[in-house]
Image (cartoon, coloured by chain):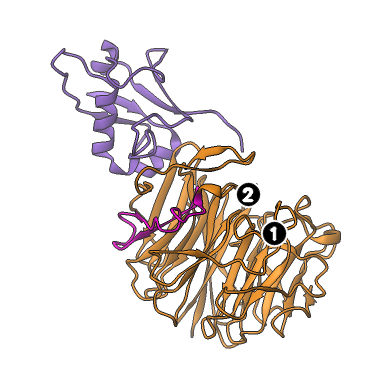
């Protein structure tokens, strides 16, 4: 199972705890991609559609970042393969809201 | 006994204030959606327990929440607001073309007749409609695609469609106001639109009486007399007696005619309320004194209402959607401030008291009179 960590506002919105578990099967290249996990996340929690990626363009929203295993995946394309530790569930994919005041 | 429910949108959540018809003791519920900006929430006139909420943050975008039990429980509904076709550009602050980009819903206006029908005014300025209780939204693109659309430019708060007024008498007629494009009217349920700005004058514009470019802050109508409209403009309080075909100034003896909200008494169509603000560069009451002004003759002659309101060291603002009235026999008037106070008067504005004092900055106040 893939573990996805969500920021507080999205946890409240989706009615979930600090992490959600998603069953995302590997693709033909035996990889699990960032885009596939986000697709699965939105399929399981439709209320999150539009909150992480733009409805129309599919682009990451400006104040949202993706991290896994200490690496910033925010600027990677959707078909980037996630690290093995994320795929085997030992590390989460983190969806992070930018730090800002107000 | 009848009661009142006051729906308050703030920078950090929504609050629901309820009282019986005496309006003396209040119950405060909230924050609902804590931490989110609640630009507006409003109940359906056809089903008062049906509420719609605009919930947003800069981080995670727009949500629309719906309640079918008067705010007891909520359900997220549709949040996809896609402009019709290729949106094109409007003018940016410096006059250069800027792509139309959805930012947030400023105002939700439920249908007068059908609880599943609701209109949304959004930034960048456009009008959307849902006919399925907010699950899906379609743009009424006749407004944004008006010949002048590419020349619209934002006000300081963004290019927002913030006012939607539905005519209860003339079928199909509705009004919309956009900062800083102006006022528009449709006579065919929002399919086509035309500017209704004749008589408006805005000195900041290269052509002060141009058709487009006026920073209209709010329009109010009394439902029994829908051809009479009152407008608080960036500067100037205005009135139309012909459904927007022409406007004339009614600022009269106001200490300043800058402000944001404007409301009409529930039972007296010539009684109007405004909250004068010092200037466009000083968004607080003149002299630190929070005064609502009331005209009982449809404008020009205004009376300050101060009893119960702070008369020294008060430097809050009252935003465009943050004043409303109830329709009990003795009309109640309500407004919220950027300092987090919600003030109420149960006697048409003669006496005021704070229902709550320390909410986050208030963005909107809507009042429901319950049976």
Which of the labelled discs sits on residue B234, or is there none? 1
Res B285 → quadrant: bottom right
- The residue tagged 2 is B155
Element class at badge 2? loop
Q: Which chain's residue wears label 2?
A: B
Q: Residue at x 61, y 34 (%)?
A: A101
Of all chains in the rendering, the one displayed in purple is: A
Which of the labelled discs sits on residue A24, or is there none? none
Q: Dots 2 and 1: beta carbons under 8 Å?
A: yes
Q: Which chain's residue wears label 1?
A: B
**Can you give x and y, in whole percent of width and height, for residue A39 in the image?**
26, 31
Could you tell which of marks 2 and 1 lies nearer the N-terminus?
2
**Can you give x and y, in whole percent of width and height, for residue B26 in the image?**
58, 70
Determine if residue B73 is in view: no
Q: Does the magenta-highlighted stretch encompass residue B124?
A: yes
- Few, some or many C-alpha atoms within 10 Å of disc 1 (few <14, some 14-19, many ≥20)? many
Rounded to the nearest whole Å, what is the CA distance between mark 2 and mark 1?
10 Å
Q: How many marks?
A: 2
């Amino acid at each position: 199972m893939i573990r996805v960590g969500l920021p507080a506002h999205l946890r409240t919105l989706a009615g979930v705890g600090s992490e959600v578990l998603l069953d995302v099967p590997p693709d033909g290249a035996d990889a699990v991609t960032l885009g596939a996990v986000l697709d699965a996340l939105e399929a399981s929690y439709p209320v999150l559609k539009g909150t992480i990626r733009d409805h129309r363009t599919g682009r990451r929203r400006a104040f949202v970042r993706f991290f896994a295993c200490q690496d910033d995946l925010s600027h990677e394309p959707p078909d980037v393969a996630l690290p093995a530790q994320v795929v085997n569930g030992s590390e989460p994919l983190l969806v992070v809201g930018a730090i800002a005041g107000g | 006994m009848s009661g009142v429910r006051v729906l308050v949108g703030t920078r950090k959540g929504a609050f629901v204030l309820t009282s019986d018809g005496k309006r003396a003791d209040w119950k405060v519920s909230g924050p609902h959606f804590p931490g989110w900006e609640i630009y507006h929430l409003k109940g359906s006139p056809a089903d008062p327990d049906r509420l719609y909420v605009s919930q947003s943050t800069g981080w995670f975008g727009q949500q629309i929440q719906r309640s079918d039990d008067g705010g007891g429980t909520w359900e997220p509904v549709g949040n996809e607001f896609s402009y019709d076709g290729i949106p094109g550009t409007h003018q940016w602050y410096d006059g250069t073309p800027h792509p139309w980009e959805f930012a947030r819903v400023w105002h939700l206006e439920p249908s007068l007749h059908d609880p599943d029908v609701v209109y949304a005014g959004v930034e960048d300025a456009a009008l959307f409609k849902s006919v399925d209780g907010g699950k899906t939204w379609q743009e009424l693109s006749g407004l944004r695609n008006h010949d002048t659309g590419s020349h619209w430019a934002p006000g300081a708060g963004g290019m927002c469609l913030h006012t939607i007024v539905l005519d209860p008498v003339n079928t199909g007629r509705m009004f919309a106001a956009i900062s800083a494009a102006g006022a528009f009217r449709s006579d065919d349920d929002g399919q086509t639109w035309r500017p209704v700005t004749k008589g408006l004058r805005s000195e900041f514009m290269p052509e002060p009486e141009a058709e487009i470019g006026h920073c209209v802050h709010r329009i109010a109508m009394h439902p029994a007399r829908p051809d009479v409209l009152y407008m608080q403009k960036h500067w100037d309080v205005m009135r139309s007696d012909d459904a927007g075909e022409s406007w004339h100034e009614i600022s009269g003896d106001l200490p300043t005619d800058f402000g944001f909200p404007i409301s009409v008494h529930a039972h007296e169509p010539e009684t109007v309320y405004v909250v004068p603000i010092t200037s466009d560069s000083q968004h607080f009451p003149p002299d630190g004194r929070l005064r609502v002004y009331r005209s009982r003759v449809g404008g020009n002659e205004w009376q300050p209402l101060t009893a119960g309101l702070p008369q020294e060291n008060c430097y809050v603002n009252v935003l465009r959607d943050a004043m409303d009235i109830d329709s009990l026999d003795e009309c109640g008037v309500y407004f919220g401030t950027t300092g987090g106070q919600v003030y109420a008067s149960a006697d048409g504005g003669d006496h005021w008291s704070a229902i709550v004092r320390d909410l986050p900055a208030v963005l909107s106040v809507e009042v429901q009179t319950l049976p």
